[in-house]
Image (spheres, rainbow, N blue to C red):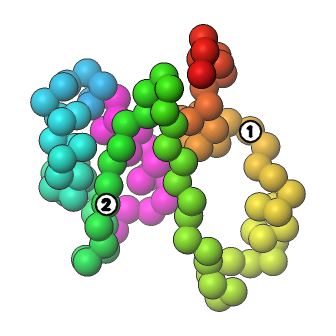
Amino acid sequence: MVNAENWEKQWGQLVAKAWADEALKARLLENPEAVLEEHNLAIPPGTQVRVVENTDRLVYLSLPRKPSSEEISDEDLARVASGIVGNDSCSATYFPNKPPKSL
């Protein structure tokens, strides 16, 4: 199984490949489970995956499921509650450094 850090790295590599290969991008959007499996990005059995593409005028944000109290430490909860500082994958993906010309 891929850990979270490796998942992010491998997902980033797959995104770069999809940007360079329209056929791969089309397959990733249409059948993400198969493409993820081909790139050794396993997902738990029975889990559905949807891949959507942001545009200049439409941005998708993912609202993660709420972790149970057994899954998140008090330290992690405090960090999340105080906000994330830095170039995390969400802000880098959804809100690049350059704002769009117009919305």
Q: Residues within 10 Å of mark 2 (few under 14, many from 20)?
A: few
Q: Position of residue 18 (x, y in %)?
A: 26, 31
Q: Residue at the location (22% across, 34% down)? A: 25
6 horizontally vs 21: left or right: right
Report the span colored magenta: 1-16
Q: Position of residue 98 (x, y in %)?
A: 64, 16
Q: Choose mark 2 or mark 1, whichever is in front.
A: 2
Find residue 91 and report its image quarter. Answer: top right
Q: Where the C terminus falls, by quadrant?
A: top right
Q: In terms of secondary structure, where does tag 2 sit?
A: loop
User: What amino acid type is highlighted by mark number 2?
Assistant: Val
Per the image, is 31 magenta? no
Q: Please determine whether, in this image, residue 2 is positioned above or below residue 70.
A: above
Task: Say how many tags the image has.
Answer: 2
Q: Which residue is mark 1?
A: 86
76 horizontally vs 68: left or right: right
Q: Which residue is mark 2?
A: 49
Disc with the residue nearer the chain's start (2 vs 1): 2
Tell me how far mark 2 sits from mark 1, CA to CA: 27 Å
Q: Residue at the location (44% across, 62% down)? A: 3
Q: Residue at the location (49% across, 43% down)? A: 60
